[in-house]
Amino acid sequence: MPSVRKHNVWIYICLLPALTGSLVFTVYPVFYVIYLSVHQVDLLSGTTKFVAFGNYMRLLRTPDFLQVLGNTLVYTLLTVAVSCSLALVVAVMVNRPGKFHAFIQTAVFSPHIIPLVSISLLWQWLMEKDSGLLNGILQGVGLPKLLWIDSPDTALMSLMLVAVWKSLGFNVVLFVAGMQSIPGQTLEAARLDGAGPAVLMRRIVIPLLSPTLFFALTVNMIGSFQVFDSVKVMTGGGPGNASNVLVHWIYQTGFEFFRFGDASAGAVILFLLVSLLAALNFGILKSRIHYQ
């Protein structure tokens, strides 16, 4: 017994650094943000005043914040829907055995391992209104130039295009791995029963791929809500707040305008929003997931 207790003590001692790090850098900041979200912070006098839900109520009545909230929802829903749908189509094409199978998978996956700041700088150059490659292509086929990130009408769409391009490879690899785990006997039996490619996809592949689809939807949704780098580098939230999203707004409000109460309230709203959509995702899709 003494040796067992000694062993357990060593386990707790070994866990202590990781536990301390989690408390200091994760748990404490979460509670401090909640504390700040119900206070008005005055940096000049160094005082804080309890305002209960005043910060939240003011934000939810502010048109700029509501626009940012709407941008975030549109960005997340469209990016996740387009990225996952496109990745499923590409995965079906890539999953076929062929000479260039491994090369194509590597090429498609490559954007995922490139830092988002580098990708944003690259796309900023591609979308440059006068000398960018994309406008050069449009003019080459007789189409008018687009302002891309310089227009309120296309700035958010341009950011979504970059996000889809970056996440496509990750989703394709996930779906290909999921398809390769489907038993060959199941597919062969369905083919012998006369099932064509469309029926195979609808009745066999997608149901058995549902755990992977569920994982991809959840991970992509959370990642889209946290987008910051591309917004900061490419548009700065502009023009006219047209491409601003919640995480970038929190950064601006807290570290550029020093409104820590509002920024903390925005962070709590973001947390609640992600939790709500994740819970809805689980609730809606839970009964549709089929495990082998």
Image: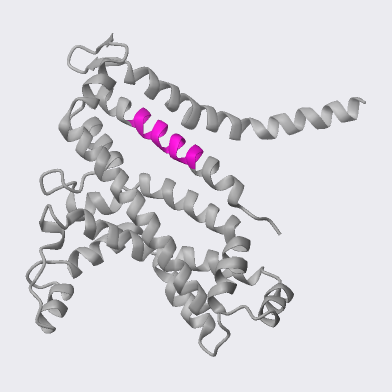
Q: Main secondary structure of the magenta part?
A: helix
Residue 242 point in image, percent of width and height: 16, 47
Specify the quadrant of the image occupied by residue 78: bottom left
**Residue at point 66%, 33% (across, down):** 15
Relative to 159, say whether 242 is above or below: above
Q: Nearer the viewer, residue 195 or 287?
A: 195
Q: Does 192 sit left or right of 57 as displayed?
A: right
Residue 179 point in image, percent of width and height: 60, 69
Q: Does 86 sit left or right of 250 as displayed?
A: right
Q: Does 20 sit left or right of 14 as displayed?
A: left
Instruction: Return the residue found at the far right.
Output: 1
Relative to 34, say whether 195 is above or below: below
Point out the image quarter for the C terminus: bottom right
Q: Nearer the viewer, residue 194 or 162?
A: 194
| Residue range highlighted in magenta | 267-280
Specify the quadrant of the image occupied by residue 133: bottom left
Instruction: Return the residue found at the far front.
Output: 194
Q: Nearer the viewer, residue 36 or 222?
A: 222
**Residue at point 10%, 77% (across, down):** 143
Residue 35 point in image, percent of width and height: 38, 17
Q: How many marks?
A: 0
Point out the image quarter for the N terminus: top right
Magenta stretch holds residue 228: no
Residue 36 point in image, percent of width and height: 33, 19
Specify the quadrant of the image occupied by residue 5: top right
**Residue at point 30%, 51% (across, down):** 229
Magenta stretch holds residue 278: yes
**Residue at point 48%, 39% (across, down):** 280
Instruction: Return the residue found at the far bottom.
Output: 99
